[in-house]
Amino acid sequence: MAWRISGTYVASCSCSLICPCPVDGPPTGPGGSTECRGVAVFHIAQGSLDDADLSGVNFAFYNFWPANLSAGNWKVGVVVDEGASDEQAQAVERILSGQEGGVFGELAGLITEYVGMERASVSFSDGETPSGGVAGKSEFRFEPARGVDGSPTTVKNAAFGFAPEYRVGKTSGRSNGFGMTFEPAYGEHADFEFSSEAPAEVRGRA
């Protein structure tokens, strides 16, 4: 079935600045750990799965990468905002779990443990200091790194990325979703667009 979603996301993980996961390097977790725990909160500005309108839906994508991303053995979980209808929530889960193809279908083979989809209040705030949150699980704020001209520092053309180009920086807050507890450190923020007709190359990153 045909689907497309676009909007804005903000992400946080346990890696030190700058997270090596987008270039398939081993994670740089606290205390010398080579594991990455993270969460990305997405706001869908426009989207659909066939006749299901997904515009306005917020969702969170939790990840545990035990090593570099291409090594697989991923653990992931999803939270869809409680304000979404059951039809919308089920559509988002089908997309993210890879059942509907596209980039998430390409990445599904790297997932060893899919812990399912839950419903809760998922908040997203854009602006100078974007933030994301999931009631009872996570809350974090993103502060972009900046160049000498004051503009946000960006990364583009990464092997793994939720967007072709994204802002990088640091995050603060807390996170404990699906048992994937971490202290927010690294962060990303960008507009995104995924679809069932996405290019063949892998561009998935949480």
Image (tube, rainbow, N blue to C red):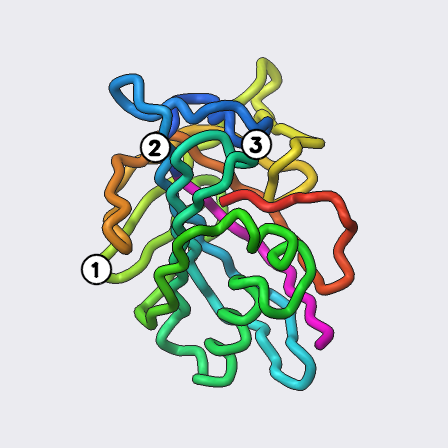
* Horizontal relation, residue 18 to residue 150: left or right: left
- Mark 3 surroundings: few (<14), some (14-19) or many (≥20) residues within 10 A: many
The stretch of residues the image draws in magenta is: 1-12
Could you tell me which secondary element the residue under label 3 belongs to? Answer: helix
Residue occupying image coordinates x 51% and y 79%: 88
Q: Position of residue 69 (x, y in %)?
A: 52, 36
Q: Main secondary structure of the magenta part?
A: strand
* Horizontal relation, residue 192 to residue 21: left or right: right
Q: Which residue carries the number 1 mark?
A: 136
Q: CA distance from mark 1 to mark 2?
A: 19 Å
Q: Is residue 30 above or below residue 196?
A: above
Residue occupying image coordinates x 39% and y 49%: 75
Residue occupying image coordinates x 59% and y 51%: 107
* Horizontal relation, residue 29 to residue 72: left or right: left
Q: Position of residue 131 (x, y in %)?
A: 39, 48
Q: Which residue carries the number 3 mark?
A: 22
Q: Total label count?
A: 3
Could you tell me which secondary element the residue under label 2 belongs to? Answer: loop
Among all residues in the image, which is located at the extreme top? 148
Mark before the other along the chain sequence, 3 or 1 = 3
Q: Position of residue 22 (x, y in %)?
A: 57, 32
Mark before the other along the chain sequence, 2 or 3 = 2
* Horizontal relation, residue 169 to residue 23: left or right: left
Q: Amino acid at mark 1?
A: Gly
Q: In which image quadrant can residue 53 be found?
A: bottom right
Q: CA distance from mark 3 to mark 1?
A: 28 Å
Q: Please name which of the two marks, 1 or 2, marks the residue nearer to the observer.
A: 2
Q: Which residue carries the number 2 mark?
A: 14
